[in-house]
Image (cartoon, rainbow, N blue to C red):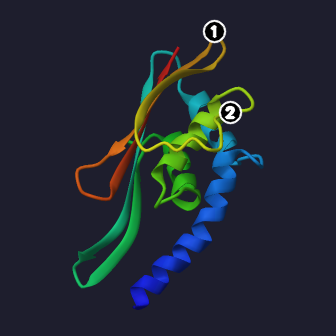
Amino acid sequence: MKTTSQLAILLIIGMPITEAQAKGNEPDSFCKELEIFLSSVQPDETHELIMRTFWGAKIVGDDMIIGSKSCDHNDYEPGKALCTYLMRNSSTEFAGYNAKRILNCLSPEPGIGENLEIHSGSFSTTFGSPDRGALVDLEIAPGSEPGEMVLHLKVDGY
């Protein structure tokens, strides 16, 4: 019963923040963090960031885990900074909102409609100017275990 109560509290607390950010009703501080990462990728460089989220219940050792997330930045300092931000300021239970936030940052106004839910997909766009910027590939897909989602952000500088 305690686990059910904890799950309900997590959902109630986590949803309003994530929904407001995904809808674009307020400026998303994530966009500045993403811009720093994207701008850091130099011409002819490729950098990737992979964030894994798990939402559900599983036993790990003596503990029951409700949700978790991890972020791999491949020892790239700007990627490490973005991972640090994502670990504190991203959704665990609604992985599609994380992808939607990235797409809203990269899309011209008004961005992606608030009623669009992303469950999986692959998206490509550009960042910067025609002379200096990056090709951005974003993929969100289920991971190898039930309840796991993988967000893969790959940036090729030009």
Q: Is residue 30 above or below residue 111?
A: below
**Residue drawn at 22 percent across, 80 percent down:** 61
Mark 1 or 2, which is nearer the eye? Answer: 2
Could one spot residue 136 in this view of the protein?
Answer: no
The image shows residue 59, relative to residue 117, as above or below, that is below
Q: In the image, residue 47 lies at what x, y percent?
A: 43, 31
Q: Residue at x 77, y 49 (%)?
A: 26
Disc 1 crowd, CA 10 A, few/some/many (<14, 14-19, 20+): few
Quarter of image, res 4? bottom left
Residue 147 at x, y percent in the picture:
32, 59
Disc 1 residue type? Answer: Pro
Q: Position of residue 1 (x, y in %)?
A: 39, 91
98 relative position to 104: left or right: left
* Residue 74 shows in this picture: yes
**Residue indicated by mark 1:** 130
Taking the spot 65% from the left edge, 38% from the top edge, the residue there is 113
Note whether 10 is above or below 158 in the view shown.
below
Could you say which is closer to the camera, residue 42 or residue 33? 33
Q: Tell me the SS state at disc 2.
A: loop
Task: Identify the residue under disc 2.
Answer: 111
> SS for tag 1?
loop
* Mark 1 or 2, nearer chain start: 2
